[in-house]
Each structure stands twice: as structure tokens, then as C-alpha cells.
Image (cartoon, rainbow, N blue to C red):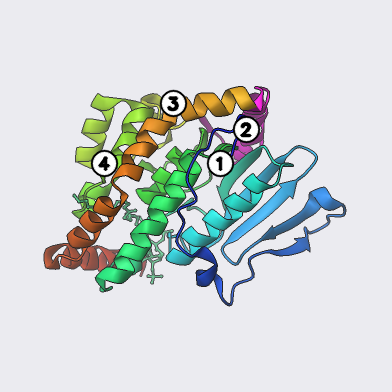
Amino acid sequence: MALASGVRFAPRALLRPWALLRGTTLGRTEPAAGGGGDGARRFGSQRVLVEPDAASGVAVMKLRNPPVNALSLELLTELVISLEKLENDKTFRGIILTSDCPRVFCAGLDLTEICGRNPAHCAEYWKAMQELWLRMYLSSLVLVAAINGACPAGGCIIALSCDCRVLADNPKYRIGLNETLLGIIAPFWLKDTYVNTIGHRASEQALQLGSLFPPAEALQVGLVDQVVPEDQVQSTALSEMARWLAVPDHARQLTKNMMRKATADRLLRQRDADTQNFVSFVCRDSIQKSLQAYLEKLRQRKG
Ligand SMILES: CCCCCCCCCC/C=C\CC(=O)SCCNC(=O)CCNC(=O)[C@H](O)C(C)(C)COP(=O)(O)OP(=O)(O)OC[C@H]1O[C@@H](n2cnc3c(N)ncnc32)[C@H](O)[C@@H]1OP(=O)(O)O
């Protein structure tokens, strides 16, 4: 993705995203309900709904992978493609990322993608996760997360990859990296993202304890930038977006790159090793057993 200055952000190393989308509706454009002109047309895919507003240069991107927006391989791929599409369209300067699923922003990794799967599948899945993080973390667009639901683990990472986070004030909407409670370990680049956001000591504590912060605590620790009543999340996200868009793009983009590049480069240098670590770790019998038990617990909790 080339900036006006010619600086490149993330390399186009992606997988084979299109191959995953057979049978989906990505790229379809349809008028938004009640909409008329170009600015009101929406597009997207099965799991990512994009509502672009050409007049403001802002698109609202909604995750819709019910019931909990778990990051399936398809959702990861569709997110990357939708992001790329908006980045390549000079009309757009910002994206508000939110959830179309009630009460959940994103439940994190889709555990069914790594439970009982073969190493090749786990590797493909993890590469897609890396790719989305790289694309979001280094995006030239302003990304604002309008967090309108629970936001654990991988969901938190999606939010942390944005430039700004607005969280709905509901005690059930907790946010954080709870990996240790599942018996898994956040890899270094998730840890780095955490440290970059809330600092070393707070990350050390929160990562080891697997803390999921309710809104007031999330605000206090710096995990989110604003906590507002649920019905004001979208409007506040739009106000935040306006604040970020008031800065000239080239200056903001180069500054973002300066702040984030070293963290992203660290993963880029070790991407294959990180994938191998992930695969060998999650494919261990003991880890498979604890993931399986966790999934079972989630399923039973329901009834
Ligand atoms: C050193 C080497 C390095 C090794 C690297 C190791 C790997 C590191 C990876 C780190 C990165 C990210 C980690 C993750 O993201 S793991 C996922 C963590 N997510 C969670 O813990 C959240 C679990 N879910 C919940 O807490 C709740 O579902 C919710 C999000 C709060 C919503 O609650 P709800 O009451 O509205 O819904 P609920 O009834 O619980 O769930 C509905 C159905 O959805 C299923 N489900 C929920 N979460 C997941 C998920 N993450 N993956 C797959 N499926 C999920 C749940 O089982 C219900 O299913 P069903 O309808 O009963 O069939």
C-alpha cells in the first residue's frame, strides 16, 4: 500500500484470499436501505458489511459472523479484502469498525479453526490472522473501533490495531487478552501491541492474569479512549473520526508508520517461525485438550 510519499506500509504478502471466497458474495454492491446516491451504496461480503459514505470519506465496516463474530478463516479473509478495497479507493480516509452481532464485538479466534484440525490448516489460519493484523496495524486509513459488545482476546487485538477505541458502557462488554486463562500464550506481536497501548507493567500484569477489563477499568488502564452510553457509541466514533481526519493525511500516515513500523517489522522478520511456533504449540495434545474443554464449557454455559 503506497502512501502519497511513496512510503510503503505492509507488503502484499497475502495468502490467496480470493480462493477462499468461492460461493460468497464479496464485491456485491447494493443500495443501503433507504439510500439513494453513490454515498449510500453499501458493499461487502457475507461476513463483512461495508456502508460507505463517499461524502465524508468514511466507511462503516460491520462484522457479521453470528453468533459471536469468531474470527473464522473466512471472516479474516473477507476483512482483509474489504480493507484493501477501501484503501485502494481514494475516496476513503477512514473506517469505523463495529459489530453487527448483538452484545459481542468479536469473540476472538474461532476455536473451531484450531481444535481437531491438522497442522496445515492451523498454519493457514494463523497466517491469515497475521495478515489481518499487519494490514490493520499499518493501515494508511484512520481506523476507529466502535466496540459495541464483548471484546476478548483476538477481538481485543482487532480493536488494538485501530487508531482509536470507543467502548459502550456495559459491564458485560469486557475487553482484554485472556489467553492465559485458556492455557494459551499471546505471541510476541500481540504482546507488543498490548505494551504499545497500555505500557509494560500494565501489560505484564494483565497478560499473566488474563484480565478482561470492564469499561471503567479499560478506560483507566488506557485500553480504550472513550467509554460512552451504548446508544452513543456510533456518534462518538464519528466525532473521534472527525478529530483524526482533521490532520493532513500524509503527516498522520507517516507518523503512524513511524510509531508502528518497528513492531510490525518484528513480525515480518519472523513470520514463518511465528507460524511454526503457533502450529506446534496448538497441535500439542495437552493444548488441544484444554481448548476442547474450553469450547465444551462455552457450549454448556448456554443452556
Ligand atoms: C509460544 C508459542 C506461541 C503459541 C501461540 C498460541 C496461540 C495464541 C493465540 C492468541 C490469540 C488469540 C487468542 C484467542 O482469541 S482465543 C479465543 C478467546 N475467546 C474467548 O475466550 C471468548 C469466548 N467466548 C465468550 O466468552 C462468549 O462467547 C462471549 C464472546 C462473551 C459471548 O457470550 P454469549 O453468551 O453471547 O455467547 P455464548 O453463548 O457464549 O456463545 C455462542 C456460541 O458461540 C460459540 N463461541 C463463543 N466464542 C467462541 C470462539 N472464540 N470460537 C468458537 N466458538 C465460540 C459458543 O461455543 C456458542 O456456541 P454454540 O451455539 O453453543 O454451539
Residue 236 is tagged as 2
Q: Which of the two discs, 1 and 4, labels the residue nearer the N terminus?
A: 1
User: What secondary structure predominates along the stretch shown in magenta?
Assistant: helix
Regarding mark 4 in the picture, which secondary structure is present there?
helix
- For marks 1 and 4, give the one nearer the viewer: 4
Q: Is residue 170 visible?
A: no
Dot 1 amino acid type: Ala
Compare residues 141 and 222 and report the one nearer the observer.
Answer: 141
Residue 259 is tagged as 3
User: Could you tell me how far apart the alpha carbons at marks 4 and 2 are, in whole angstroms?
Assistant: 32 Å
Q: Which of the two discs, 4 and 3, labels the residue nearer the N terminus?
A: 4
Dot 3 amino acid type: Met
Q: Are marks 4 and 3 in contact (CB under 8 Å)?
A: no
Regarding mark 1 in the picture, which secondary structure is present there?
strand
Location of ligand 1 given as a quarter of the image: bottom left
Residue 58 is drawn in which quadrant? Answer: top right
Write down the region rendered in magenta. Answer: 225-249
The residue positioned 87% from the left and 52% from the top of the image is 37
Regarding mark 2 in the picture, which secondary structure is present there?
helix
Location of mark 4 (residue): 188
Q: Which of the two discs, 4 and 2, labels the residue nearer the N terminus?
A: 4
Q: Residues within 10 Å of mark 3 (few under 14, many from 20)?
A: few
In x, y percent, where is residue 147? 51, 43
In x, y percent, where is residue 154? 38, 50
The residue positioned 52% from the left and 23% from the top of the image is 255
